[in-house]
Amino acid sequence: MNIVFMGTPDFAVPCLEKLIKSENCNVLAVFTQPDKKVGRKQLLTPPPVKVLAVQHNIPVYQPVTLKNEDAFETIRKLNPDLMVVVAYGKILPKRILDYPKFGCINVHASLLPKYRGAAPIQWAVLNGDKKTGVCVQQMDIGIDTGDILFTEETDIGINETSEELFERLSVIGADALIKTIDLIIKGQTNPVPQPDGDFGYASMIDKSMSNIDWSKSAFEVHNQIRGLQSWPCASTVINGKNVKVHKSVLSSEKGNEAGKVVNNKNVVTVSCGDGNCIDILELQPDGKKRMDAKSFLAGNKIETGQFIGE
């Protein structure tokens, strides 16, 4: 099976690795986003998928758009049997979707039709879902609306962060991709159309979501903290300074006023709007490294009874 792979971030790397190792697959080329300037020094940095492709001497293409004639002509010359898309970050025009013999398939990190869109992993955690998974879909012109070819479910741990779930689903997705391609080769796929309707769109995550509203329930606050890990991270104000909150657990303590500190012994226990509490385990003051709560408390005075988030 001659394949063109389209992907960009770390999430797509295990899928490309599996394709490279598969005896049934020949990766003709990789399409990925252009290199970007990263960090304070603004160093031009290649996407993780490009790094892997170069290591294996696979041709790499980084078009700014797929809508022009050059992009289509490149794909036409490559003449793939199948195109695999994993977190590529660009919309594929219809003529590209229709060109390969077996079309284009996409590995999406949710149980479609739920969480179509760019950030399905984060929203599953933010919403406190107990289950999620990976779907391999036959792509069409809609956003994550194509027929489902393969699904793999997994539980979400009560303290699992979106970063941790991201890593797990990337591996699950790679296995699901290879199983799907085997079915395609054998002619044994059974495409299942997605139902019509609005099942929730997983919009992009942004910094405006960071500030913790302590009037919400403890479960909602805990989900915000683990859902926004590792970017942009939940945050709150402590002693007049902004602090990122990296890790929490639901506490056995009880409180009565939102944002009130009820325990400062090695953890920072804060009361939420429903009278339940969370234990903050890891924090990061502006300009400093991430640290555990005990280390934070050693250098930052927090009294029981004081309020944070103000």
Image (cartoon, helix red, strand yellow):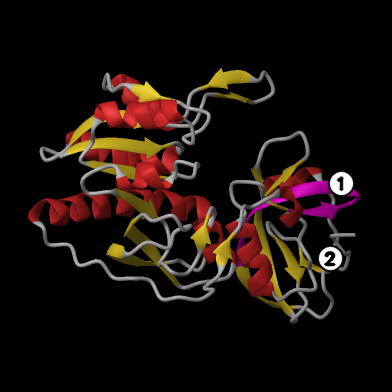
Q: Could you tell whether 227 is left or right of 241 in the image? A: left
Q: Could you tell whether 92 is left or right of 18 in the image? A: right
Please say if 77 is above or below 133: above
Residue 75 in the image: state x and y as whole percent.
32, 31
Q: Could you tell me how far apart the alpha carbons at marks 1 and 2 are, in whole angstroms?
A: 18 Å
Residue 23 appears in the picture as rendered = yes
**Residue ID at (61%, 57%):** 203
**Residue ID at (11%, 58%):** 187
Pointer 1 or 2: first along the chain: 1
- Secondary structure at numbered mark 1: strand
Say which of 163 and 296 sits in front.
163
Q: Which residues are magenta?
A: 235-249
The total number of labels drawn is 2
Residue 31 appears in the picture as rendered = no
Please say if 253 is above or below 148: below
Please say if 138 is above or below 74: below
Q: Could you tell whether 264 is left or right of 37 in the image? A: right
Mark 2 highlights which residue? Answer: 304
Residue 150 in the image: state x and y as whole percent.
26, 62
**Residue ID at (75%, 74%):** 216
The C terminus is located in which quarter?
Answer: bottom right
State the predominant SS element of the stretch in magenta: strand
Which kind of residue does numbered mark 2 sit on?
Thr
Residue 224 in the image: state x and y as whole percent.
65, 62
Q: Could you tell whether 104 is left or right of 101 in the image? A: right
Residue 10 in the image: state x and y as whole percent.
43, 39
Mark 2 closeness class: few <14, some 14–19, many ≥20 residues within 10 Å: some
| 293 in magenta | no
Mark 1 highlights which residue? Answer: 241
Which kind of residue does numbered mark 1 sit on?
Lys
